[in-house]
Amino acid sequence: MKSIGLYVDGPNIERGLYEAKETAILQNIGNILKEYASLNGDLIESFVFIDEDTQWREETTRMNYEVNGFKFIESKAFKYFNAGGGYAYGKSLTDPAMYCFLIDRLHDEDCPDIFMIITGDKDITVPLEYIKAHEKEVMVIGESSTMSGYLISKCNELGYRCHSLQLISHVSDFKNMIPETITRPEVKKRNEEKRPKSKVRPNQLNPNNIAYWRSRGFSERPEDWEERLRKERNDQ
């Protein structure tokens, strides 16, 4: 049986599930991921990467990670002086801390055979190249509506498995949340006939996706996208 390391981009996956209103998954994410990983091999380690300003949308999220044996790796966040006359937190080192950890792990004798990475962020594609060069397997799992299209295409290019997190039905009863709820993105095509057709792609409605900003004339997501988004919504 192959060994598995489970690595969660905490802020990314939590924000994605929260915005998608996947509360049932958000409250039981540690258990869901642990069960799914165990079906694919021998789970030898589980880490959640967060920053010092992490504010959990659901307190049960952190508790569920902890009860399922996940360890937290906390990184620093950048502070800035805001208009209100005080300091606030901005960008953090969570992403680079996670990526450096993964690359460094490749050089350990007990390095897992499979890297199960939980994120929808396209920036993870850089470490994926290094992992591929070391002939290790990767499984990428992200929230279905906020997963980067570029990330999915890169996984296909590298021959890695890429899945999306979604509930078969929106229920609060945990017994209905089985590992099959983690499915390939293409599975969602089954419901397309039932949905009204729209000229606007879902990704263009998601400010965390590059398609949203390209539909507004940007080549990439701007650095001040959160400020622009607030202004855009205030002007509506």
Image: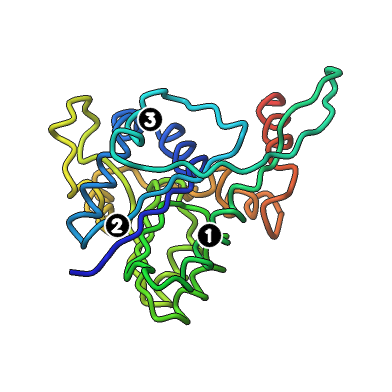
The vertical placement of 91 against 201, above or below, is above
Amino acid type at image mark 2? Ile
- At which x and y percent is residue 68? 28, 38
State the separation of the CA atoms marked 1 and 2. 16 Å
Front-lying residue, 36 or 112: 112
Q: Secondary structure at mark 3?
A: helix
- Image quadrant occupied by the C terminus: top right
Amino acid type at image mark 3? Thr
Is the residue under label 2 in contact with that under label 3 (CB below 8 Å)? no
Q: Earlier in the sequence, mark 3 or mark 2?
A: 2
The residue under the point 29% across, 33% down is 67
Amino acid type at image mark 1? Phe
The residue under the point 49% across, 36% down is 15
User: Residue 74 lies in what quarter of the image?
Assistant: top right
State the separation of the CA atoms marked 3 and 2. 21 Å
Q: Earlier in the sequence, mark 3 or mark 1?
A: 3
Q: Which residue is mark 2?
A: 44
Left or right: where does residue 8 sit relative to residue 222?
left
- At which x and y percent is residue 28? 29, 33
Mark 2 crowdedness (10 Å alpha carbons): few <14, some 14-19, many ≥20: some
